[in-house]
Image (cartoon, rainbow, N blue to C red):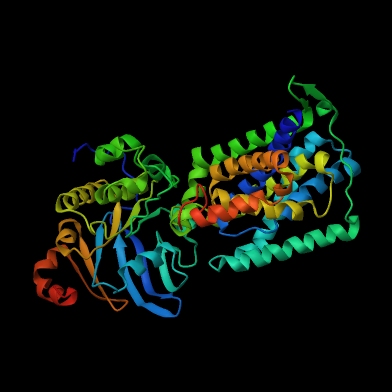
Amino acid sequence: MQALYAQLLVGLINGSFYALLSLGLAVIFGMLNIINFAHGALYMMGAFVAYFLLNLGGINYWWALLLAPIIVGIFGMILERTMLQWLTGLDHLYGLLLTFGIALIVQGVFQNYFGSSGLPYAIPDQLRGGMNLGFMFLPIYRGWVVVFSLVVCLATWFLIEKTQLGAYLRAATENPTLVRAFGINVPRMITLTYGLGVGLAALAGVLSAPINQVRPLMGADLIIVVFAVVVIGGMGSIMGSIITGFALGVIEGLTKYFYPEASNTVVFVLMVLVLLVKPTGLTGRAA
Amino acid sequence: MPDTAIAEAPAKTASGGNILQVRNLEAWYGESHILHGINFDVNAGEVVTLLGRNGAGKTTTLKSIMGIIGKRTGSVKFNNQEIIRATSDKIARMGIAFCPEERGIFASLDVRENLMLPPVVREGGLPLDQIFDLFPNLKERLNSQGTKLSGGEQQMLAIARILRTGASFLMLDEPTEGLAPVIIQQIGHTIARLKKEGFTILLVEQNFRFASTVADRYYVVEHGKIIDGFSNSELAANMDKLHTYLGV
C-alpha cells in the first residue's frame, strides 16, 4: 500500500509540472495563437538560471523562485518582440516551426557547454527531510512542490478569469483589433502574456531542479507529455490545463503501480481516445 | 426609456468648432482599393450621418478614422491633430470611441465585464448609474454572458460601454441593423439625448428613416467617395436625389 501512495505522490509531483507547463502553453496559445514548442527549453532555462544564481551569485532557492521566472520571462519577451510578433495572422505551423527551432538552438547551446549529464541543485535547508503521515513517508520538498504549484496555478486562473487585466486578455483573445480600438495597447499586452507563460515554465524549472537535477534536455523529455496534456485538456483552456495536468500526473502514477509497462504511454493512449471522442479536448471549445 | 438628465457632459471641444476633418482619405483591404479620396468635416456637437448603399465604403471610412485598416493614406485631423499614422489605441485615447457594426460583444465576458472593458481615456465619461438610467435592461443582466443578450440589448451594451470612457466623439456603425422597430426607437432617443448632452456623433446608417430623426447633416458615400452632402433643413429638397443614390 505504501508503494501505491508513493506512486500517487510521484504522480502529483509530475502533475504539478504538467499543470504549470500546460497552463503557460494555454495562456500563450490563447493570446498569441502560437503553439510554443520552445516551452521545454524555457523550463530548462529556469532550472539553469536557478543553478547559476546559486553557484555564481550565491543567491538561494527562495530568491531564485522569484528571479528565474523574471529573467527567463524577459528573455521570452525579447523572443516575442524580435521574432514571434512577425507571425501574427500566419498559419499555426509557422509559429510551431519557429519555436521548435528556438528550442533546438537553446538546448544545443546549453548542451555544448554543460553536456548531457545533470548538475546537482540542493534542496533548501528549510525543505529537507520528511514527515511520517502514518500511511506513508512524505518528503517535505515534494509536498511543497505540489502545494506551491497548485497555489500558482489557481492564482493564474484568478488573474485571467476574475480580474480586469484578465478581462482584457480574454477579450483580446477573441477580438484583438476591437480591444485595441478601445485604447488598450494590445501588442504590449501580448508581449507581457508571453512573458507570463514563459515565466510559469521557468518557475516549474526552478521547482524541478532539486528533484530532477539540472540538465539541458530536461525540458525536451517533458514537453511531449505536456503537449499531450494540453490536447487532452483543450488548447487554450486555463482551468482545463490545470485540472488535466494534475489528473494525468495522478493517472500516470497509478499506472506505474498497477501496470508499470504502460506508464510511459498511458497519457498518449488517453490523448488518442479524447481526440476520437472530443477533438477540442475535455474543456476546450470549438474554434 | 427613462428621461433622467445626464448630469455630466463629456469633455467637449469649442461648441460648433471643427472636430474632425477628413481629406483625401484612401484605404485598402489587401489589394482592394476601397476608399478613393473621402473628404468631409464634422463639427462639435453635431450628429453627422454617412449614407450609402452596401459596399459603398461607409464602414471602411469609420475604420480608417479609427486606425484599424491596414493601409490608409490622406489626412484625418481630430481636434486639429493629425491621426492618420496613429495606432488605434492612441486614437481611442485621444477621445474617439467606435461602436462596430457587428457590435463586438465578447462571448468570454459577462455583461459587467463587457461594460467595464474599455478603459476611461479622459474625464467626463458617464457614471454607471446614468448608463443604467439610459439602458435599464443592462442592469438586470449584469451577470449574463455578453452574447446571451438579445440583439437590441447587445446594441445597447455596445453603445453603453463607450459612454463610460469619456470619449467625446462617437462613431456608431449601423446601430439599428437587424433590430425591432421599438428598439430602433429607443436607440434614436438615446442618440438624441447624447447629442443634447454635447457628444459629437458620426453615424453610419442604411436606415434613412432612422437617420433623419437624429442627424444634423448627411454625406452620401458611393464607390469610396463622398458624392453629395446636405443639412437636415435641405432634406426635403433632396429627397428625390437621395432615393436615387440609395436605390430605394
Q: Is residue A274 visible?
A: yes
Picture coordinates of residue A48, whole percent (x, y): 82, 48
Residue at image location 55% in from the left, 68% down from the top:
A91
Q: Residue at x 30, y 46 (%)?
A: B149
Left or right: residue A211 versus residue A194 is right
Answer left or right for A175 relative to A65.
Answer: left
Q: What residue occupies the far top of the structure in this picture? A: A134
Name the one closer to the observer, B232 or B52: B52
Image location (x, y in percent) of residue B203 = 27, 60
Where on the picture, by quarter, is residue A147? top right
Viewport quadrant of the N terminus of chain A: top right
Count of picture labels: 0
- State the residue at coordinates (31%, 43%): B9
Instruction: Looking at the picture, tell me which residue is in the foreground, B112 or B144.
Output: B144
On the image, the x and y values in percent for residue A183 come to 47, 52
Image coords of residue A194 (percent x, y): 63, 53
**A218 versus B27 height, above or below:** above
Name the residue located 90 percent from the left edge and 44 percent from the top edge: A56
Q: Is residue A14 above or below residue A90?
A: above
Q: Nearer the viewer, residue B106 or B63?
A: B106
Tell me, yes or no, if residue A25 can be seen here. no
User: Dividing the picture into quarters, in which one does residue B235 lie?
Assistant: bottom left
